[in-house]
Image (cartoon, rainbow, N blue to C red):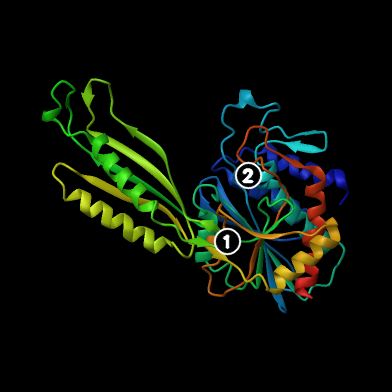
Amino acid sequence: MDQQEKIQILKDLVNINSTNGNEEEVADYLKKLLTDHGIDSEKVIYAEKRASLVSEVGDKNAGKVLGFSGHMDVVSAGDESKWTFPPFQATEKDGKIYGRGATDMKSGLAALVIAMIELKEEKTPLNGKIKLLATVGEEIGELGAEQLTSKGYADDLDGLIIGEPSGYHIVYAHKGAMNYTLKSYGKNAHSSMPELGINAIDNLLKFYNAVENQVAKMSKENPILGKFIHNVTVISGGEQVNSIPEAAELQGNIRTIPEENNETVRKIFKEILEKLNQEKDVHLELTWDYDKQPVFSDRESTLIKIAEKVAKAQIGQDIPLLGISGGTDAAEFTKSKKEFPVIIFGPGNETPHQIDENVDTDNYLEMVDVYKEIAKQFLN
């Protein structure tokens, strides 16, 4: 496949608006691309207009199985008038490709798929197979990875590469992620007579302050992932300025580490909630919207060692290993029946979720060769 064709594939993917849904159009595009190169694929329907894609190349009856994975959804482009180029009209300029999803993570997904196609076209002997797991809904809960894992698609993996944007780093660990919603119920009254009402915002803030006080005490650190993180990111409540609010709500996001894990957080929040709800006129309700465990791989694993060696040879520099705060589909895939190493390694930069998101064309193209060589060495 020539360079311009590879670039056009990425542009085609960016041009598909798969914002928090509509991934089936991406799956259909990739399915046709793979079919045109003699590779069969299977769509796994998640919901209307939403389907993950599974495909395989190599020896399906022997050897190891290396997973290639990327998500097909993107986040909202926000105010499109602020973009230099239309977010869903991929634009190539000054060695970069601009558009929503260019970095996160249609470039990684395209590079993985192209690597599979080229390995087949080059008739590269593989003692095992590569399995593509292209997912829906990563940005809003790792929905596709959860579905594919529950259906057993990850049970035969011996290693997994997720092409999320890591730049010139190999990620082998990331924090867990938890999202929650806290609702406070009160009673309306005129603001001149607050004693006749129950201020839902006041009670919401009791919870907020109690959690912040507790979080301040959680000082343990992980040598790879750093500190536990908690942020309240959304607050709403009240209807008008001269009325006591009868309802208020906040949402929070947490990044956990093994030393301050998900179970510990749930326990602390439960104790705070139960204590506050014993107070007069306090009625709080907590819902956990998202609960993903931290991911750790053995940094001495064969997959990581091969990836380091290949990346240095192909890119021409040492590629550091590190852990990150952001989550990936690995949190779901690693729940499969078999333990396996995972790396997050893909083209990209610091522009995910930002206006004028872009990817360096050279970084995108070089990752195709990196993925091919890692697969050859890992499987053979």
Q: Nearer the viewer, residue 320 or 68?
A: 320
Q: Position of residue 64 (x, y in %)?
A: 70, 76
> Is residue 261 in view from this perspective?
yes
Disc sitting over residue 37 in the figure: none
Mark nearer the viewer, 2 or 1: 1
Q: Point out residue 226 in the picture as x, y percentages from the top left corner.
A: 54, 57
Q: Residue at x 54, y 47 (%)?
A: 139
Amino acid at circle 1: Ala
What amino acid type is highlighted by mark number 2?
A: Glu
The residue nearer to you, when weighing 44 against 195, is 195
- Cα–Cα gap, marks 2 and 1: 24 Å
Snapshot quadrant of residue 206: top left
Displayed quadrant of residue 268: bottom left
- Asked whether residue 38 appears in the rendered view, the answer is no
Please give the label number shown on residue 25: 2
In the rendered image, the vertical position of residue 113 relative to residue 374, given as above or below: above
Mark with earlier residue (2, 1): 2
Residue 40 in the image: x percent, y percent? 71, 61
From the image, tell me which residue sits under label 1: 330
Q: Secondary structure at mark 1?
A: helix
Residue 11 x/y as whole percent: 75, 40
State the SS at label 2: helix
